[in-house]
Image (tube, rainbow, N blue to C red):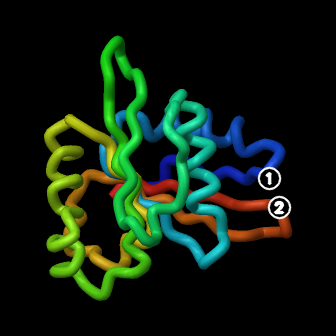
């Protein structure tokens, strides 16, 4: 089910992140798909800025998992930023600890932002949000958000 369809530029990405979070905040697992260079990490960085994450947000391409803390509902919450680009298959994702992060999110103890979810799709179970980012110009993007 489609929940959001927006366009944004680098100049308006922070506004887009705010609109996105209004739709996404009740989902603990959010996947981000799009071509290489589409802006998945850039959007996640803007979203983390919107959430007042104080940690430096960067691509976890080589670390596979980055963890960020932020204040939520009067307490502390955790975001696991997962990048599955370098994974070969689901078993490699499990060995890297991805399943544990997802289990914490399902239990309400964390959020998981997953880049390149198609690399280990078997680990994902409904409900979650699937975000598709596409390039529409040098600095322009289109985003479709579906509930799965």
- Mark 1 falls on what kind of element? strand
Q: Residue at x 33, y 81 (%)?
A: 87
Q: Quadrant of residue 146?
A: bottom left
Q: Nearer the viewer, residue 148 or 68?
A: 68
The residue located at (15%, 73%) in the rendering is 95
| Residue 116 lies in quadrant | bottom left
Mark 2 Cα within 10 Å, few/some/many (few <14, many 20+)? few
Q: Position of residue 46 (x, y in %)?
A: 62, 43
In the rendered image, the residue lying farthest to the top is: 74
Alpha carbon separation for disc pair 2 and 1: 5 Å
Q: Disc 2, disc 1: CB below 8 Å?
A: yes
Q: Where the N terminus falls, by quadrant?
A: bottom left
* Residue 51 percent coordinates (x, y): 52, 30
Q: Relative to 78, say whether 140 is above or below.
A: below
Image spot of residue 110 (x, y percent):
27, 39
* Image quarter in which the C terminus is found: bottom left
Q: Locate residue 67 relative to residue 110 in the image: left or right.
A: right
How many residues crowd around disc 1 within 10 Å: few (fewer than 14), some, or many (20 or more)? some
Which one is earlier in the sequence, the residue at label 2 or at label 1? 1
Residue at which label 2 appears: 139
Number of marks present in the image shown: 2
Question: In the image, is residue 140 above or below residue 35?
Answer: above
Percent position of residue 145, x then y: 51, 54
Q: Which residue is mark 1?
A: 9
């Amino acid at each position: 089910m489609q929940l959001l369809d927006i366009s944004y530029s680098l100049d308006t990405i922070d506004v887009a992140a705010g609109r996105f979070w209004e739709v996404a905040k009740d989902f603990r697992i959010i996947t981000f798909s799009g071509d290489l260079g589409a802006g998945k990490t850039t959007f996640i960085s803007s979203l983390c800025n919107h959430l007042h994450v104080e940690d430096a947000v960067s691509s976890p391409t080589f670390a596979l998992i980055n963890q960020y803390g932020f204040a939520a509902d009067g307490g502390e919450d955790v975001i696991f930023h997962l990048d599955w680009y370098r994974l070969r298959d689901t078993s490699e994702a499990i060995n890297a600890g991805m399943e544990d992060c997802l289990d914490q999110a399902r239990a309400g103890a964390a959020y998981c932002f997953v880049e390149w979810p198609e690399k280990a799709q078997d680990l994902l179970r409904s409900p979650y949000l699937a975000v598709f980012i596409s390039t529409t110009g040098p600095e322009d993007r289109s985003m479709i958000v579906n509930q799965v």
